[in-house]
Image (cartoon, helix red, strand yellow):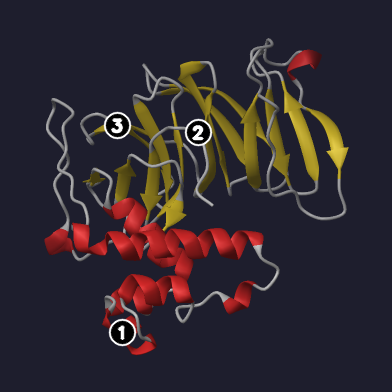
């Protein structure tokens, strides 16, 4: 249930802060109280870590077993907290199951497993100043040094993964950027798509916008081709291919519609 490429991940929240973890999943979660937030790691790239005590190990194993059963069984609803796996972890009797941490029992199986997984990984909160109203989307650079995130203040913020500190803020969108993507082979190039119906191409070292593509609908998804200077854009009911390095104004630089659908497109991705 938690497979993926071995890379870092982010957990974003409506509070505006962003947590960088050593796991391979992405999820939306509420931030902890401000008094409990850990400061960003030092410039050396180290961060504090915390883990569950050994007494929680049986419960961790039980939850992992329940997740496996849920994914492989047609009777998913039967694998709840009364399942023998969980009773065995908490005690021999069914009443002993109530002695498990109440915070885990109140959550669904997915939330409890996620909490255990994230809780055992080193993490640091990356505060933004001023704090934006929300964090929408994020993407890591292919070299693992940077994470780009989009926010309700209409900006794209670049954060250093090693220090947890903000590096630069990309400004220019008139509304909230809904998606951001790094080029899979070039950590200096990224693109963002916004509710203002515009795609912007950015150069990270200079922090400048190098090209724009206005379209008639909000931008839902973006994908760079790994081997070329080509960007796929999902906007409304159409999928566009944009050769963004062609001379501006030339026919080759105009976006080409390669797909039309009855319903709005939500995601696009190139085969790696």
Q: CA distance from mark 3 to mark 2?
A: 17 Å
| Above or below 28: residue 106 | below
Q: CA distance from mark 3 to mark 1?
A: 43 Å
The residue drawn where x is 45% and y is 78% is: 81
Q: Quadrant of residue 102?
A: bottom left
- Residue hosting label 3: 161
Q: Is residue 209 left or right of residue 147?
A: right
Q: Position of residue 39 (x, y in %)?
A: 14, 46
Marked residue nearer the N-terminal end (3 or 2): 2
The residue drawn where x is 65% and y is 24% is: 272
Name the mark on residue 5. Answer: 2
Q: Residues within 10 Å of mark 1 (few under 14, many from 20)?
A: some
Q: Position of residue 268 (x, y in %)?
A: 70, 38
Q: Is residue 132 visible?
A: no
Badge 1 vs badge 2, beta-carbon distance below 8 Å: no
- Residue hosting label 1: 96
């Amino acid at each position: 249930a938690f497979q993926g490429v071995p890379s870092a991940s982010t957990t974003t929240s409506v509070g505006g802060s962003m947590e960088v973890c050593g796991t391979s999943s992405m999820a939306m979660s509420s931030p902890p109280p401000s008094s409990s937030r850990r400061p960003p790691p030092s410039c050396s790239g180290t961060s504090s870590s915390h883990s569950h005590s050994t007494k929680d190990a049986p419960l961790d194993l039980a939850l992992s077993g329940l997740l496996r059963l849920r994914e492989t069984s047609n009777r998913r609803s039967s694998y709840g907290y009364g399942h023998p796996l969980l009773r065995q972890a908490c005690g021999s009797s069914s009443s002993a199951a109530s002695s498990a941490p109440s915070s885990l029992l109140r959550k669904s199986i997915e939330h409890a497993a996620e909490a255990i997984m994230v809780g055992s990984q080193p993490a640091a909160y990356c505060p933004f100043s001023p704090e934006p109203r929300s964090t929408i989307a994020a993407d890591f650079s292919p070299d693992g040094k940077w994470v780009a995130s989009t926010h309700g203040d209409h900006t794209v913020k670049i954060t250093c993964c090693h220090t947890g500190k903000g590096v630069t803020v990309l400004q220019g969108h008139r509304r909230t950027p809904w998606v951001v993507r790094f080029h899979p082979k070039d950590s200096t190039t990224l693109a963002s798509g916004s509710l203002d119906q515009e795609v912007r191409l950015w150069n990270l070292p200079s922090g400048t916008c190098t090209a724009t593509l206005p379209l008639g609908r909000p931008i839902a998804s973006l994908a760079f081709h790994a081997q070329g200077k080509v960007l796929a854009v999902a906007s409304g009911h159409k999928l566009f291919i944009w050769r963004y390095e062609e001379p501006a104004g030339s026919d080759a630089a105009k976006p080409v519609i390669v797909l039309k659908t009855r319903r709005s497109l939500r995601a696009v991705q190139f085969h790696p």
